[in-house]
Amino acid sequence: MNTSIKFRTYFLWAFLAFVLVGVAFAYVWTTVNEESKSKLPQYGAVPEFSLTTQNDKPISLADFRGSVWIADFIFTNCGASCPGMTMDMGKLQERLKQQRSILLVSFSVDPDRDTPKVLSEYANEHHAITGKWFFLTGKKETILPLTQNGFHLSVADAQPQGDFQPVLHSTKFVLVDKNGVIRGYYDSDPPENLDKLVHDANELAAERY
């Protein structure tokens, strides 16, 4: 066997070995990547929105891309379910404080009264960490359809009580993944539900994309 033939033979075997290693690597990578993805259900993507934070800064869905976030729907004048929900969000903030990729988002369902200034005072009262826990407001004609059609949750004005206009709204917490897809709905009672929410949020945060 002359030198030229030997060289071509060695080159062919080296090329085949390279291809086999590449195929094996691709298989292992795909397998590991698939196994790392959460098996949580998908309930559809959150539609685009443009709202305002408690710091009077514009914010949109794009600002949450790449982060896992937990949403709830409240209003500051609420005397029924909202105080408990906000307290639970405070507990979630404490438990997830070190997880920079997990955020908390409270949407006001009474945006006409919940101005950025009002939300800022409310956020301070509940020790919200700037950049971790967002309180959002905007136009009512934006937030109500977003709540109903985007998050698939109920919200409606109730019968006025004197000068006070109560708002009927869902008390569920919503888990959204890094791509803006809803992955779960959670009640705060019993307390074990919040444990599952924390677990699922951490699971999504660990996903590879």
Image: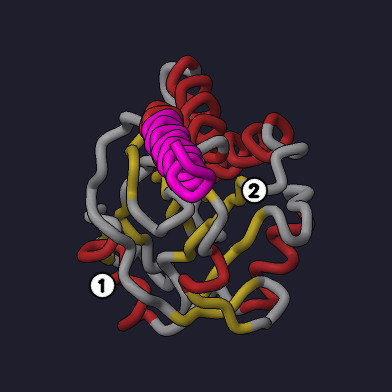
Question: Residue shown at 51%/35% (left/top)?
Answer: 201
Secondary structure beneath label 1: helix
Secondary structure beneath label 2: loop
Percent of width and height locating residue 117? 70, 77
Question: Residue shown at 38%/68% (left/top)?
Answer: 165
Question: Residue shown at 60%/63% (left/top)?
Answer: 135
Q: For residue 27: magenta?
A: yes
Residue 13 position by quadrant: top left
> Which of these two is toward me, 117 or 51?
51
Q: Is residue 201 visible?
A: yes
Q: For residue 32: magenta?
A: no
Pointer 2: residues within 10 angstroms few (<14), some, or many (20+)?
A: some
Start-end of magenta stretch: 1-30
> Which of these two is toward me, 109 or 206?
206
Q: Earlier in the sequence, mark 1 or mark 2?
A: 2
Residue 155 position by quadrant: bottom left
CA separation in Å, label 1 and label 2: 27 Å
Q: Amino acid at mark 1?
A: Pro
Question: Residue shown at 48%/53% (left/top)?
Answer: 178
Residue 77 tag number:
none
Residue 101 tag number:
2
Position of 207 compared to 56: left or right?
left
Percent of width and height locating residue 202? 56, 32
Position of 51 compared to 166: left or right?
right
Residue 32 position by quadrant: top left
Pointer 1: residues within 10 angstroms few (<14), some, or many (20+)?
A: some
Percent of width and height locating residue 188? 44, 28
Q: Which mark lies nearer to you, 1 or 2?
A: 2
